[in-house]
Image (cartoon, rainbow, N blue to C red):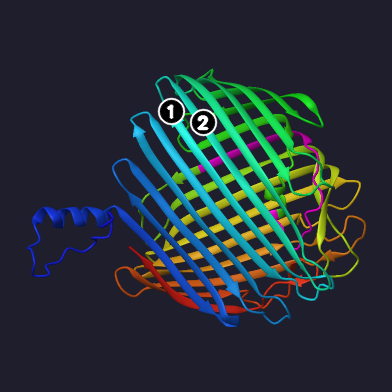
Amino acid sequence: MAEGEYLFAYDDGAEPVSQEKNEKAAQSVSRTNVDAELMYGQYNNIYSTFSIIQNHDRFTYQLNSDFRRSNDFGYNNSSYNNSQIGFTGKAEFFENWKFIPQIDVYNLSHGMFDNSSYSREEKDKIAVVFKNEYKPTPTRWNFNLGGVQYVHRLTSRTADSVESSLYKVFEEVEWEYILSPSNKFSIKHSLEQYTYDSDEIGSDITYISNEFSGGFRFSEFFQLGITGIVDWDRDEGLFPAAKIQLGTVGLKYISFDIGYRNELVPFRPDDIYFSQNFVLPDRILASSTLHRGEASMSLEADYGSGTSFSVKKIRFKAGGGFEDNSRFANFYPIDSTEASVIGIEGISAQKYDFISEFSFDCLIFARLFRFSVNYTYENYTADVNVTYRPEHQFDGSIKYIFNRGEVEWSNRITSSVYVSPFHAEVLQSATVGSLKLQFQIAETLYFNLLLNNLYGAEYSYRNGYPEPGFTALAGLRIVI
């Protein structure tokens, strides 16, 4: 019998159960965590997540899955399926050596509404990485090896389907010498190689990066990090670059960081094409040169327990910067129809950005409330419109936590976005709200209710492909 299957000790009459076996079973239960949720709702909408974490003396693993599907939600050919399964392990072969394997498998399938050329888009992605961490004090070694397979299919309405695939292999080697917790030196080498199935794109593409870094604490509260970089790819050749960062250390409630970096950034189609729906991955961009200056700060204060009206904890983070990108990946419609597929072109663009996160926990009439507000600002300057990137985005939520559960009301507000680099047409701003209730039925069993798009907003993230209207789902969650 595999370890972990004897979660309950029992006596079937053949042999009395010893106290030792009962203790082992109890230990097995205490070192295994399971979190599973299943919800069902309108349009035969299914939402399911599962996660199991098990700890052993020298091996820990997590197995998780996520599945979402829906039939047509009020529009012809709008059904979708999104699924992901993953495994992460951590084995301690020796006292100073950890082996961490990670495997993730993704599958996305979306109906393409009334698109005149294609009926469905499907994307498959498999990512495997084997990490090794070796710590013979005072040094540390990292040896990482992995690969990615990405397959993209567009089902044609009139001819053969359009399919493309790529393979990526990568390796990383890092050596770090630790003089003290605040003074260290490191050397890092990494390589990425892409192989494409299309002769139109060209031969294999290889990116190589070498970094030489030092971190030094030069006063009680300040630390300086300097990195020299030598990158290489087939288009730019050797590319010298650098990073520098100044930050605070040892402060209890607040921290500051300021930095600048100049680097060669490879185009990673397995990330960019996978993250955008209804796209035709027919173009591979050369690497871009990036200059970026940025600053950030964070604040966290814990006031502990208080009276019926009091603030318990405050968290605040803010940061922003300016960057100049020589080959920014911008989206453009490939045909003139409203429900178009999009491609990618490289443009020279500058960006100002700012991100802030603010949340606090408080007691109101001795009840715990959690308030959260996030704001993102991105402003681009280029010769053409930068598409599908809102200038302003607000996210806010209020969570009420009570003895047997919690209620959370969330809202997202996004500003309008351009849909073409050359025309003024935009997708209008939208306010989308949701309400989630979780109520404890038994010790490990919860009832969940989720209401999406509370206000019935008519909005789209892509031109010609609207998002679902008001949707209600309900189900159960088990936490062991």
Callout 1, which amino acid?
A: Tyr
- Asked whether the viewer can see residue 427, the reply is yes
SS category of the residue bearing label 2? strand
Q: In this view, does 479 lie above or below 470?
A: above
Residue to which mark 2 is pinned = 143
Residue at image x 59%, y 72%?
Answer: 69
Asked if residue 277 can be seen in this view, the reply is: no
Q: Residues within 10 Å of mark 2 (few under 14, many from 20)?
A: some
Mark pair 2, 1: CA separation:
8 Å
Residue 134's mark?
Answer: 1
- How far from the left and from the top, in percent, is residue 186? 55, 22
Helix, strand or loop status at disc 1: strand
> Do the residues under discs 2 and 1 have CB atoms within 8 angstroms?
yes
Task: Based on the picture, tell me whether residue 134 belongs to the magenta stretch.
Answer: no
Residues shaded magenta: 274-299
Report the amino acid beneath label 2.
Answer: Phe
Point out residue 244 in the picture as x, y percentages from the top left corner: 65, 25
